[in-house]
Amino acid sequence: MSARRPAAFFLGGRHLSEAASLALIIPFLVLLFVVFLLPLGTLLHESLLMPKPTTAHYQRVFGEPVYLRVMWRTARIAVYVTIVTLLLGYPLAYVMSRSGGLRLGLMAAAVLLPLWTSVLVRTYAWMVLLQRNGLVNEALTGIGIVDAPIRLLYTEGAVVLAMSHVLLPFMVLPVFSALKGIPDDYPRAALMLGASNWSAFREVVWPLSLPGVVSGCLMVFLLALGFFITPALIGGPQQMMIATLVSQQVREMLNWPFAGALVGVLLAFVLALTIAFNRFIRLERFVGTRS
Amino acid sequence: MRQGQAGAEGRVAVHDLVKRFGPVAAVDGVSLEVSPGEFVALLGPSGSGKTTILMAIAGFEYPTSGRIEIGGDDVTWAPANTRNLGMVFQRYTLFPHMSVAENIAFPLKMRGVARAERERRALAALETVRLGGYGERRPNQLSGGQQQRIALARAIVYQPRVLLMDEPLSALDKNLREEMQLEIKHLQQQLGITVVFVTHDQTEAMTMADRVAVLDHGRLQQVGAPRDLYETPATPFVAGFIGETNFLPGRTVAAAGDGMPVAVELDGGGRAEATAVGALAANAAVRVAVRPERLALAEPAGPGLAGTVIEAIYAGVATTCIADLGGERRVRARIAAGTGGRAWSAGERVGVSWQAADARAFATTAFGGQA
C-alpha cells in the first residue's frame, strides 16, 4: 500500500495556507477579469442600457426570422458535430483505453497533434481538399461516382465535417479517461457471469463511461456553438453561425448593443446547459461510477 | 436450497499446465484434480502461479501448453463466457451503476431468464447470503464484507458448475475475514458446489479447504488435506510455508527408505533421529525439519543436543523459547500452557530433544535450499 497523498497543495513538505493559495491564483484571476469578464460585462451592459435602458435589442434577436434562423442553424450544426465526434471518437477512445506502449503513443499523438496545430491551418487544409478541383472531387470523379465535380465547399456538410475534425480531441480525451478509469475486473466479471462481449460492453462498460461521454458531448457542443473561423471560411454566408453574426455586427454594422444581445442570448443558453449537465454528472457521481 | 448439484459437472482437471510470460514460467507443469463438491485451496506466496492457474480455469489466460477439463469437457481454449463458472474476485466487482438486486440478477438476465423468475431467484440468493432486504441498495452503500457476500450471491445464483474465488477476503479486516471463511465454507457444503479458492493465507486455506494445493515458483509442491500438509510435509518449502519449522542441516549416518527412521549427524555437532522423506543414501546431506511444538526442553543431560536459552516469550496460550545450539543454529520451542514443565529464562542451559516420528529429514537439493 502506498501512502495516500493529502488533498491539499503540497510544496516542499509544507502546506500552503489559504491566503498563500489565493495569492498564487490572483494573477490568473486578474487576467481573467481584464480580458474576459470586463469586455463581456461591457457588451452585456451595452445590450441592455444603450442608448437607454431597453429590451429592444433582445426583442430584435427573437423577432426577426433571419436571426432566429442563424441561432437555429448554430444549434443544429453543434448537435451534428457532437454526434459525429461521438460516433468517431468513442471507438477511438475505446481502442486507446485497451492499448498500451507504442500503439497508445501513436494514437495519442494522432489525436493530440491536430490540437496543437492552428485551427486556421486545419481549416485551409479542408478547403484545399473540398474545393471544386480538390482531392475529394478528383477521387469521386475518378472512381466514377459522380460525373462532374460537385459542390462540397460552402455547404453545411462541409462545416460539420471540418468542425468535427477540429473538435474530435475534446470528445476523445474525456471518453478515454472515463474508459481508462473502469477497472478490467468489471468487464471480466460480466464475461464470467455469462455476458457476451457485446452485452458486457452495453450493460457495464458503456453505462460506466457515460460521465466521460456527457462531458465530452458538453465540451464539443459548447465549443461548436461559439465556433468562428471554420464556419466563416468553409461555410460562407449561407451557413452563417452566431459567432460570425456577432463579428459582422461589430465590425461591419458597428452595432455593439445588438452584438451584445446576441452574446447575451448565447451566454444564457450555454450557462443553462452547463448547469443542467453538471447536475447530471453530479448525479452520476452520487450513484457511484467508481467504487 | 438445492443440494448436491455438483454431479460429474463439478469436476475440474488440470493436466500438465504450463504458462510462460516471455522467458518466465509462471506455471510450470501443474496437474491437479478437483472432485465434484470438493473445496480445494491453491496456496502459495505471490508469484507462485496460483492466480495464473485460476485465470486459466476461468478462461482469462490461455496456457502455453497443457489441458483443462471441467465436467469432462475440454475447455482449454473455450472463452470465459461459455464455461458456466462462478467467480468472486479479489477486488469488489459489483457493478456500481446497478442495484444489489440487479447485480445478482445480471447473470440470469444474460441467460435469458424471464424478469419475474430473475427477481425471485435474486431475492432467494440474497436470503442465502443473509442480506435479505438489501436488494434496492447500491453497492457503494454496503461495507466490504457485505459487498463480497453479494458478489458471492451473484456467483451462485445461476448454479454454475464450479465456483472460483481469487483471494475474495484479502481486503477485509481480520475478524470479518474469519467470520466469512466459515460462512463461505458452510454455504459451499450446503450447496454442494465445487470450489477452487486462491489464497496466500495458510490459515485461511487450512480453515476452509478439504484439500490444499501448495505452489511455489509455478510448481506444485504438495496436494493434501490440511492435516497431511502440516504433519507430513513433502518438501522443505511446504514444511516452512505452512506453520513454523526449525531446520537443522546434517548428514545421514546410514541409508534409509522412505518413511523409515534415520539417524542424522547434525552440522555443528549433535546427533538426531528423524523420519526419512524419500529414500536417503548414507552420508547424504539432509535438513531435519521439526515443529516448535514437537521440541521437548529438559535439563541438559547425556549426549543429546543442548544449548542456551536466548529468550522466552510468554504469550498466554503458549510460551516460545528460542535456544542457541551453537554453530549459528537457533531453534524455537513452543510449550503450550497447562502442559506442566518448568519455565525457562534467558541464559539457562537447556537440553533439546524430539521423537523420530516428529522430525522429517529432507534430502538437500539445489532447489530445496531456502525456506
Image (spheres, coloured by chain):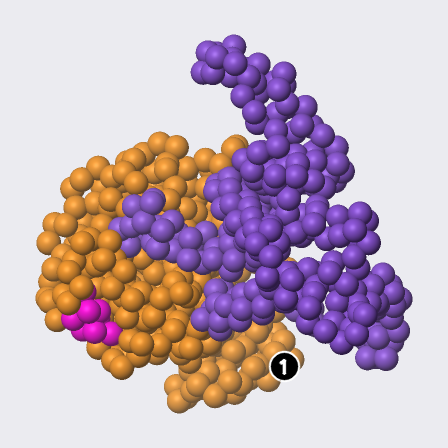
Main SS category, magenta section: helix
Spot occupied by residue A62 in the image (x, y as percentages of width and height)? 59, 62
Mark 1 residue type? Ala
**Residue situated in front as seen by the camera: A224 or A183:** A224
Mark 1: which secondary structure?
loop
The residue singled out by tag 1 in the image is B346
Q: Mark 1 lies on which chain?
A: B
Q: Which image quarter: residue A33?
A: bottom right
The colour of chain B is orange
Q: Which chain is purple?
A: A
Residue A112 position within the rendered picture, expressed as x and y whole percent measured from the top left? 68, 40
Please rate how many residues cluster around mark 1, counting C-alpha atoms within 10 Å: few if below 14, some from 14 to 19, many from 20.
some
Q: Is residue A221 visible?
A: no
Q: Is residue A86 above or below residue B272?
A: above
Span colored in magenta: B118-126
Position above or below: B341 against B83: below
Q: Residue at x 45, y 16 (%)?
A: A145
Q: Position of residue B278 (x, y in %)?
A: 34, 46
What quarter of the picture does the N terminus of chain B occupy?
Answer: bottom left
